[in-house]
Amino acid sequence: MEEPGFSVLLVEAGDRKTNAVRVIRTVTGLSPFESKLLLDRSPAAVTEPVWFEAAQDAAGVLEGAGVNASASGSWSPSW
């Protein structure tokens, strides 16, 4: 059975935008400019569909930096 895809949704930046840009760079590998654009476009998907554990970890890292983020799935049963 294939694992459903989960994404990390950036809900809002929070108060510490400089830290938020750094953490988004860490999670996504984007440049500082692209990370700031993503932050300014919130709410926005931060990751492509990934395994549940990876989405939870990324959301936790973002939350730790004061960014409001959540892991969300697009899974639907196939029965």
Image (cartoon, rainbow, N blue to C red):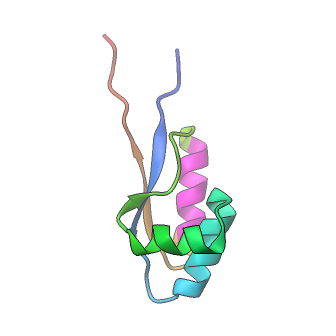
Residue 75 location (% of width, % of height): 37, 30
Residue 54 location (% of width, % of height): 61, 46
Residue in the foreground of this view, choosing between 52 and 12:
12
Relative to 67, say whether 18 is above or below: below
Query: Is residue 55 magenta-colored?
Result: yes
Q: Residue at x 31, y 10 (%)?
A: 79
Work out which residue is located at the far bottom of the displayed protein and give it: 15
Relative to 4, say whether 23 is above or below: below
Q: Is residue 30 visible in this depiction of the protein?
A: yes
Q: Residue at x 53, y 41 (%)?
A: 52
Instruction: Give the number of marks.
Output: 0
As drawn, is 32 to the left or to the right of 55? right
Residue 77 placement: quadrant: top left
Residue 47 location (% of width, % of height): 53, 50
Q: Is residue 12 visible in this depiction of the protein?
A: no
Work out which residue is located at the far front of the displayed protein and give it: 33
Relative to 38, say whether 73 is above or below: above
Query: Is residue 60 magenta-colored?
Result: yes
Residue in the foreground of this view, choosing between 67 and 26:
26
Provide the major secondary structure of the magenta segment: helix
Residue 10 location (% of width, % of height): 43, 64
Residue 13 placement: quadrant: bottom left
Q: Residue at x 52, y 88 (%)?
A: 16
Relative to 45, say whether 75 is above or below: above
Magenta residues (range): 53-62
As drawn, is 75 to the left or to the right of 29? left
